[in-house]
Image: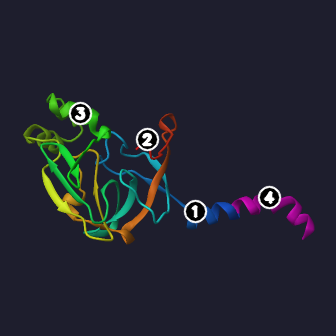
Amino acid sequence: MKDFMKNWGFFIIILSVFILLRLFVVTPVSVKGHSMDPTLADGQKLLTLKTDKVERLDIITLQEPDEPEKMAVKRVIALPGETVEMKNDQLTINGEVFAEPYLDEYQALFDTGQLAETYAYNPQFQKTAENAETFTSDFSYTVPEGQYFVLGDNRLVSKDSRYFGFVDQSYIKGRVIWRYWPLNQMSLFTKDSN
């Protein structure tokens, strides 16, 4: 037994730590679809941190409220009890204007009529871009306690709280902390980088 532990002990400890981290702390996920373009792209691999604390602008993984068997990656926009409104592509939360710099690239393409070209991979997305009057459709909601309002960064094609409703705290599975694939796009997601 002593020889076994001497030869394999370090490996067993590392494997045990990895398993515990995977079960209780971090979860690997893959991005499927284009709702978070250009922040996150289809096929990218992420690590999420399992957490109870969610803040505005966190990018999270969640179960879709209308189809709980499906997982999604979205951005938290409004917190429990807040009133969130979008009018003419201007976001306000509790009556205060809120900037969304993560939308700048696609918003600029939309404003110049070039977003349809970006959507060349999907004719339906192209048609949506050509016919839309605003990048983010107008809405106004008050978020119930214990719920969150989430949106995808690619607002014209994202299925999010505008469609499936508010997200209960229990449906949130983790906060994205690291993009590890592809390697040339590896990056940490901190509060400042969101």
Instruction: Of the two numbered discs 3 and 2 on the same chain, state the one appearing first in sequence.
Output: 3
- Please name the amino acid that badge 3 sits on: Thr
Residue behind mark 2? 193
Circle 1: element type: helix
What is the x, y in percent for residue 106?
A: 25, 35
Vertical comparison of 116 with 29: above or below: above
Q: Which residue is mark 3?
A: 118
Name, please, the residue furthest toward the front. Answer: 95
Magenta stretch, main secondary structure class? helix
Kind of element beneath mark 2: loop
Crowding around mark 2 (Cα neighbors within 10 Å: few <14, some 14 to 19, many 20+) is few
Q: CA gap, disc 1 to disc 3?
A: 36 Å
> Mark 2 to mark 4: distance in Å?
36 Å
Q: Residue at x 26, y 61 (%)?
A: 82
State whether residue 95 is above or below residue 17: above
Contact, mark 3 vs mark 4 (Cβ under 8 Å): no
What is the spatial separation of the Cα atoms under label 2 and label 1, in whole angstroms? Answer: 24 Å
Q: CA distance from mark 4 to mark 1?
A: 18 Å
Q: Which mark is residue 68?
A: none
Which comes sooner in the sequence, label 2 or label 1? 1
Write down the region rendered in magenta. 1-15
